[in-house]
Image (spheres, rainbow, N blue to C red):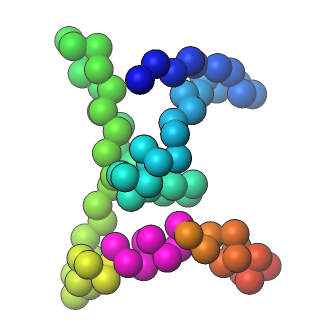
Amino acid sequence: MIRKIFKTGNREVICLPSEMLKSLGVGVGSDVNIELDSITKRITISSLEVSIHGVNEEFARHVSEFIQEYRPVLEALAR
């Protein structure tokens, strides 16, 4: 997939398709891990898996999906 780098403010940005981000389980506001391999000149983006003692991984995934789907509503309720 070919993407263009563009400028927004003082930053350079690469726009990624939402279906790609969804398959990673990330969205607006998600923390991700970015790694650069300077030898192969490749950037790897992966979801940041935060482990919380006592929280079932499947439950955490469901909560994350719920937050991603309803983020605008949750943000409006938080005001």
Identified at 38% across, 78% down, the residue is 62
Count of numbered badges drawn on the protein: 0
| Horizontal side of residue 36 vs 70, given as left or right | left
In the rendered image, residue 53, in percent from the top left (x then y), is placed at 22, 81
Residue bounds of the magenta highlight: 61-68
Percent across and percent down for residue 48 are: 33, 55
Look at the image and say whether residue 54 sits in the magenta stretch: no
Quadrant location, the N terminus: top left
Write down the quadrant of residue 39 in the picture: top left
Q: Which residue appears at 75% of the width and 28% of the height?
A: 9
Q: Position of residue 52 (x, y in %)?
A: 27, 77
In the image, is 40 to the left or to the right of 64? left
Residue found at x 43% / y 72%:
64
Q: Is residue 50 above or below residue 12?
A: below
- Left or right: residue 61 compared with residue 53: right
Camera sees residue 76: yes
Task: Examine the rendering and report whether any part of residue 31 can be seen.
Answer: no
Image-quadrant location for residue 8: top right
Quarter occupied by residue 54: bottom left
User: Does residue 56 lie above or below 41 as drawn?
Assistant: below
Main secondary structure of the magenta stretch? helix
Q: Is residue 65 above or below residue 20?
A: below
Q: Looking at the picture, does residue 43 appear above or below residue 46?
A: above
State the residue at coordinates (44%, 54%).
22
The quadrant of the image that shows the C terminus is bottom right
Queried whether the magenta region covers residue 67, the answer comes back as yes
Query: Could you tell me residue 70's position as x and y percent?
Result: 61, 74
On the rendered structure, is 11 left or right of 25?
A: right
